[in-house]
Amino acid sequence: MYGVILAGGSGTRFWPVSREQSPKQLQKLIGTGTMIQNTVQRLLPLISIENLYVGTHQHQAIETLRQLDSFGFSPDQLLAEPCSKNTALAIGLMAKVLAEKNADAIMAVFPADHVVSKPENFIKVLQKAETLAQKGFMVTLGIPPNRPETGFGYLKQGLELEDFEGIYRADRFEEKPDISKAEKFLEQGTYFWNCGIFAWKATTILKELQQYAPDIHSQLETLRGCIQNSSGKLNHLELNAKGCELFSSLPSISIDYAVMEKSSNVVMIPADIGWNDVGAWNALDEVCEKDSKGNVLTGNILAQDCSNSIVKGQNRLIATLGLKDTVVVDTPDALLVCAKERSQDVKNLVESLNEKGHQEGKRPATVKKPWGSYTVLDLGPNYLLKRIEVLPGESLSLQSHQHRSEHWTVATGTAKVELKDETHQLKTNDSIVIPLNAKHRLGNPEKELLVIYEIQFGEIIDENDISRYDDRYGRC
Amino acid sequence: MYGVILAGGSGTRFWPVSREQSPKQLQKLIGTGTMIQNTVQRLLPLISIENLYVGTHQHQAIETLRQLDSFGFSPDQLLAEPCSKNTALAIGLMAKVLAEKNADAIMAVFPADHVVSKPENFIKVLQKAETLAQKGFMVTLGIPPNRPETGFGYLKQGLELEDFEGIYRADRFEEKPDISKAEKFLEQGTYFWNCGIFAWKATTILKELQQYAPDIHSQLETLRGCIQNSSGKLNHLELNAKGCELFSSLPSISIDYAVMEKSSNVVMIPADIGWNDVGAWNALDEVCEKDSKGNVLTGNILAQDCSNSIVKGQNRLIATLGLKDTVVVDTPDALLVCAKERSQDVKNLVESLNEKGHQEGKRPATVKKPWGSYTVLDLGPNYLLKRIEVLPGESLSLQSHQHRSEHWTVATGTAKVELKDETHQLKTNDSIVIPLNAKHRLGNPEKELLVIYEIQFGEIIDENDISRYDDRYGRC
């Protein structure tokens, strides 16, 4: 069985921890790893790492690869999409890739940013799913509901399969219901949550797409031909220019709407797997451990007389007093304080931030780069201070700046600095001046992290003031 | 008339903006200046700056002087106290100083951290107070109450003075009442809030102290003899070692308990001056402008669907959603989120922080020094990054460090660096390394602010790792 992890979410509901440029699946919200790391980890008992594929937005490709590196995940199992097009297109293209690789390939599809708190049950259910997919079924997992949730779609349980006890035809897909309908569903006991986990033969889903979504299916062959290895050293899969254009022109539609609701070939496995989509901050109530007063507290926190609140910080001290049902999320450059019942509306709040031009809506304080990251620590009228971290063996592009000079001091590690025609090795407490217009490159030749402080000086200080001459990540 | 401003408050109720090392009177909470600047400003129509005296804790002396510098306030009108001893002792000592200077001196006493929103009325009331003080009365201002406040003392209005219409004997001082008593006071209409503003002849209060607080009065002569100019360049008044010891041994008692409650010589002027003691965060509701939903918002804030809340930030973005009656106060190193009705308990919260060893309870992120300030921006395993601001014409002590080397880079301004036997002038983008154990001094020889980034490197990084050889502020 092959696993396809769809990691395209934007996760604005988890602002300010998640941002457009560092969405929810790349964040540590619950458990030991990031959401996508946890997702991979829970699949490994059944699907080996070389049979796992990931689809993600191109902006998240490098960070996603870094997070999966320790699993031995190969870059050429990641497909970077040029834009977000919902699930039907991504699933179709992955099915095409897998069918070509193995005509009998079974393909299971997983969201990257959900929680499954009963991993053993999960694996058992997936084994059943594999068997059913072999038989040519379109398999869905149905989560037994425990509340009249209006935020999910529902599956109606149909007839039991003849040869498979406890497995049912999916009679109907119900879109997100209103509350009275949701209450009826819960009462009747024959409705299950659609959790977005599917299994099928790659060839089966392609046939279904051909029948129900021919506009997408008809382009998959061409799109497949446009997949190439990315330039630069990372070598993940991406589309060439023609492929990007075609991809962008195709409809943005979910696999549920495109196929599942129409197909008569869908079966449902009731799946008691402790599933949670962790849709917004208040979901932490359901998936995290709470203190005796019902609080979920993470970080450097002193909470006095608080109850049923979620407080998540980092290093900064957070003191809370007398809070009830409140969410406090603190990050280095932005703070959210929110009534818990309004958690779903954080999405709209982020839209307002973006409309008003607040960069904090999209960009995190620490900006990830293929070579590491940078964080702005201080800003003056004609200067700016950054902490720059360069990962072992990585290096920035060969570059120059028209409007600023720079001053680098090594805090820890070893820096290899190319400046004009010379190369310098800098250690802790060494510094170097990069003059205006001088070609330069910063690299980390050692196996430990390199941290430098960069002070930029100039009349204009702007990230876009950069000319790149050579770049191992193909960004010239 | 002489004015004595008592600036001894610790202001823990305004944490995290105020800290033990930078209390409320030194903060900008309302209006254009800091609380003490606003206090001075409102007195100037009646009392010239050379007739204003300030008593404060020695730790706040230098910052207080800086804040009053633009008024032309002379350092030798500030008396730095070695410890907090409430108001009786400070008032007695100031009376001693003033009586010596001018046997007929009228002395008015003001807290440094209150708000007066009707400054014209205030001046008129003070003029009356001056006249009454001339006649030998102990004058208090009585604030007409508008609510049954249990946090203040009350004055009971007695007989009207024969020659002064609308001015009354103070029949009784009532300590903070319980709520039912406070409600009765409000109903009766003859009780006024004691706001801690007094006026009297210096010789009158000394006589009263002699009668009612002889333990304090008997030491004033000796204490007066122990006042000296501080060493170093700032020249404010302080007590010598003997004086400090004596001062510390004397009782900590308010002038109300020590004298006012006992004296039969007290008169009260009902004072409709828009007074507010700004006792805790919720008081901002009464003294600040609110938006249409009753919110007081200061800083970089996006508030959606919030009401009756107080949100105070600095540069960091704060987004609030659906909050009601909540206080959010954000500073670079500490955040408070608090139910508004619990504002008074912030004081206890800060005690808990101190007990648990959180430095943020006492020390602000930007630490004020006689020469300027420093802020820790980043911290690694064996390094630490500081932003250092040196005021024009100031310089740090000649010093060395046993366990760390330092790397300085000038961000803006000009640095004069003494290192071993040489002197260097550093401009923007210049840097210098200060080796382990090397004697060095940093100064700002120019008229603009000097900002440097200092990176400290060492196995041990500790503020106490400093040997001082010479210091213009007398800190050797």
Image: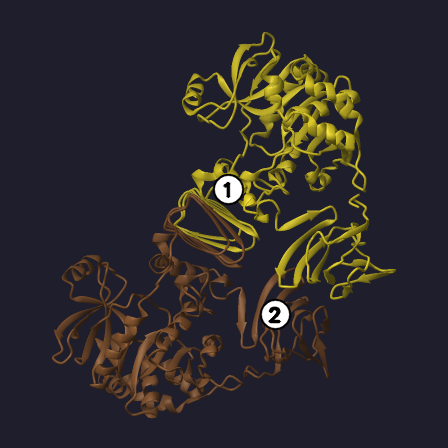
Chain colours: A brown, B yellow
Crowding around mark 2 (Cα neighbors within 10 Å: few <14, some 14 to 19, many 20+) is many
Residue at 76%, 29% in the rendered image = B243
Chain designation of label 1: B
Type of the residue with mark 1:
Leu
Residue carrying label 2: A388
As measured in the structure, the alpha-carbon distance from the residue carrying label 2 to the one carrying label 1 is 37 Å
Q: Residue furthest right?
A: B421
* Residue B282 seen by the camera: no
Q: Is residue B410 left or right of residue B264?
A: right
Pinpoint residue A406: horizontal percent, then vertical percent: 69, 70
Q: Using the image, tell me which numbered label, if any, was put on residue B131.
A: none
Residue at 56%, 74% in the rendered image = A372
Chain designation of label 2: A
Pinpoint residue B423: horizontal percent, then vertical percent: 85, 60
Q: Is residue B77 above or below residue B406?
A: above
Determine if marks 2 and 1 fall on one subunit. no
